Image (cartoon, rainbow, N blue to C red):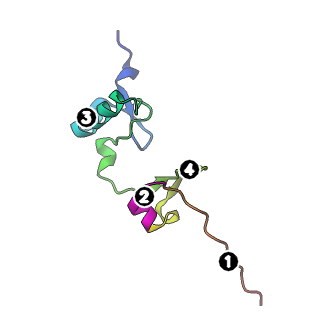
Amino acid sequence: MADPRLNRLRCENGEWRTRSDFSNNQLARYDQALRNHKATPAKTGIRCTEHINKQAVELKCQGPCGRWREMRFFSRSTRRNGKDVSFSPRPRFARPHF
């Protein structure tokens, strides 16, 4: 009997899904990356049909922290370019002393 875990792929949102939960285009993209040794079932680079139509509200920092952060932490140009997506903590402004 085949192991049911072999039929599961991890969505970009971190959820494990069956292959039937992905579109044919997404699966073709994954299969090509798998052939080129650039993907694994845990790191697919594709989104399931439930999440593909939703607007992104968070991005994963590609910097040293690797955390998922809200979009407001990333500059517009960083979000648009999509390369080297990393955020820098907002500067803390000194409060005026009264």
**Rendered location of residue 55, percent (x, y):** 35, 57
* Label 4 sits on residue: 67
Q: Nearer the viewer, residue 90 or 58?
A: 90
Residue displayed at 35% across by 41% down: 46
Residue displayed at 44% across by 32% down: 42
Mark 1: secondary structure: loop
Q: Earlier in the sequence, mark 2 or mark 1?
A: 2
Furthest residue toward bottom: 98
Furthest residue toward top: 1
Structural crowding at the residue carrying mark 2, measured as other residues with C-alpha within 10 Å and reported as few (<14), some (14–19) or many (≥20) = few
Q: CA distance from mark 2 to mark 3?
A: 26 Å
* Label 1 sits on residue: 93
Q: Is residue 83 depicted above or below 50 in this figure?
A: below
Badge 3 amino acid: Ala
Badge 4 amino acid: Arg
Quadrant location, the C terminus: bottom right
User: CB atoms at circles 3 and 1 under 8 Å apart?
Assistant: no
* Label 2 sits on residue: 57
Badge 2 amino acid: Val
Structural crowding at the residue carrying mark 3, measured as other residues with C-alpha within 10 Å and reported as few (<14), some (14–19) or many (≥20) = few
State the mark number for residue 29.
none
Q: Earlier in the sequence, mark 1 or mark 4?
A: 4
* Label 3 sits on residue: 28
